[in-house]
Amino acid sequence: MAAQAHAETEFPELVRFREEWKEEVRQRRAARQQTESEPPDSQTQRHAPPLVGTSQLPPASTTACDSSDLPVQPLSQADLHNRVAVSVSRASLYTSNSESNNSSTLTRAVGIYRSAVQHEQEGRLDEALKLYSQAFRLEQNVDRTYFWEEQRSQQLAIPSPLAADLGGLLKATFTGKSKVNAAQGTTIIKADTKDKYCASGALAKLIANFPAELAFTPEDEREGVALNVIPDELLLNVLRSLDTTTIERFAAVCRKARVLSLDSSIWKDFIYMAYKPPQIPDADSVNAIIKRFNADYRQTYIEQPRLRLDGVYISVCHYVRRGVSDYAWVNSMHLVTYHRYLRFFADGTVLSLLANEEHTPQNVIPVLKPSLRMKGFTVGNWQLDGSIVRISNLHSPHYYPSSRYNFQMSLALQSKPLGRWNRLEVLSYESVNVETGEVAPFVLKHERPFWFSRVKSYPGYH
């Protein structure tokens, strides 16, 4: 008895667990006696299969113990952990899909865990840590139950028309209150303004869940946001004066900023500035390109290939050359590094420069202009055919103005990641006899892909 009193003093949770276990055994015994006393018809009705659409719980254990069978000696710590694990597993099995059948202890633990998560999100880490500890003391697997309930609630919150259209193209036009068209998988938001916001694919699914009324929210709720006073029309005029990188960074601030950044007028300006000859075969081709992307100007600007004019494409090449030594037993090798530069202009002019490692990109980029006088510098013409860049008539205007040969290149335009269009893979490099038109290809051993580097001083599209 002294040992039992000591255990009750040292392990209050053990005492609580023993009392709960006794109460559970008494309830099972009473339920078994009631089942045995009921007539067969009542038992058949009790064990009838559940109705369609209801969730069937796993059957409870048929083993029952009398209270007189309970051990007199206190449980060891190992037995306590085993019984707690069994209790938690049983509680997790009795969780239904439509309603929570958790025990009162598990429900209380989940509530404390949810409060701990809120405290952590608000930055009150000390309070969150105390609540986490309290929740895990009540139930060991409370985190699993909490995340299961959160996942279930998120699944129930997804609108059925959007969930059913996972594979199709989802197009959204936003200007006010939302309206879901289940037949076409299209989300349309209408308002009194004439501005329209357009998005496709995963972005449209994300914005379809936005509330109808959007505003800039402050980090501190006690402070206001000056942007809410500015009309949307004025904000759109400001956005139209920015570059695409700045617009996308602004769009990542909040929901209102994301919706404003999708205004068709913003991306329409970029489309008509970028996609014109020699980016496309002729001026009328841009309308066919926009139609192919269902008038989603932002998606067109991202996915339609285009050469970047606001920077320079640089290829860093290496090769190893055997050196000369005064001694036969010494074998010297030299690593040679050189750079190739390509700068494109909107009028179809391209500048090409081959420079050794003495001329670093920091020194070359500021002077890479048509007036450059340098060995290895050539000027030519370029045209974009789909995703293939064709460079022709490369010649040296200063060192060899009357040369019998010029050069031409073919490169594959690629984008990593999508929308950057920052990589040029060399497909061919050839020399052309001006008089006869004979073409002689060069063997490409050491050539490497060109990667784009943005230069703030370069004008880009205009």
Image: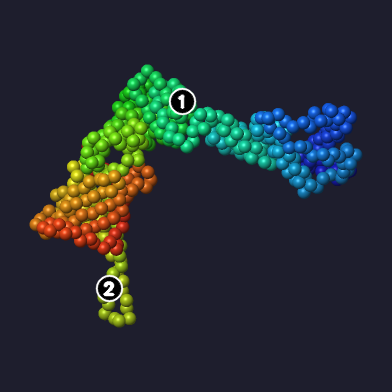
Q: Position of residue 225 (x, y in %)?
A: 41, 25
Kindly identify the residue that appears in the image at 79 percent across and 32 percent down.
Answer: 47
Residue most toward the bottom? 328
Q: Residues within 10 Å of mark 1 (few under 14, many from 20)?
A: few
Label whose residue precedes the other's in the sequence (2 or 1): 1
Q: Position of residue 68 (x, y in %)?
A: 90, 39
**Identity, as a three-letter code, of the amino acid under mark 2:** Gly
Residue 429 appears anywhere in the view: yes
Instruction: Write down the residue under mark 2.
Output: 323
Residue most toward the right? 68
Instruction: Write down the residue under mark 1.
Output: 181
Is 453 displayed left or right of 99 in the figure? Answer: left
Residue 239 appears anywhere in the view: no
Kindly identify the residue that appears in the image at 50 percent across and 31 percent down.
Answer: 162
> Closer to the camera, 226 or 374?
374
Is 182 displayed left or right of 430 in the figure? Answer: right
**Identity, as a three-letter code, of the amino acid under mark 1:** Asn
Residue 259 drawn above or below residue 427: above
Tell me the element at label 1. Answer: strand
Kindly identify the residue that appears in the image at 16 percent across and 59 percent down.
Answer: 438
Kindly identify the residue that appears in the image at 85 percent across and 34 percent down.
Answer: 32
Residue most toward the top? 192
Residue 154 drawn above or below residue 304: above
Whole-Å distance between the Cαs marked 2 and 1?
73 Å
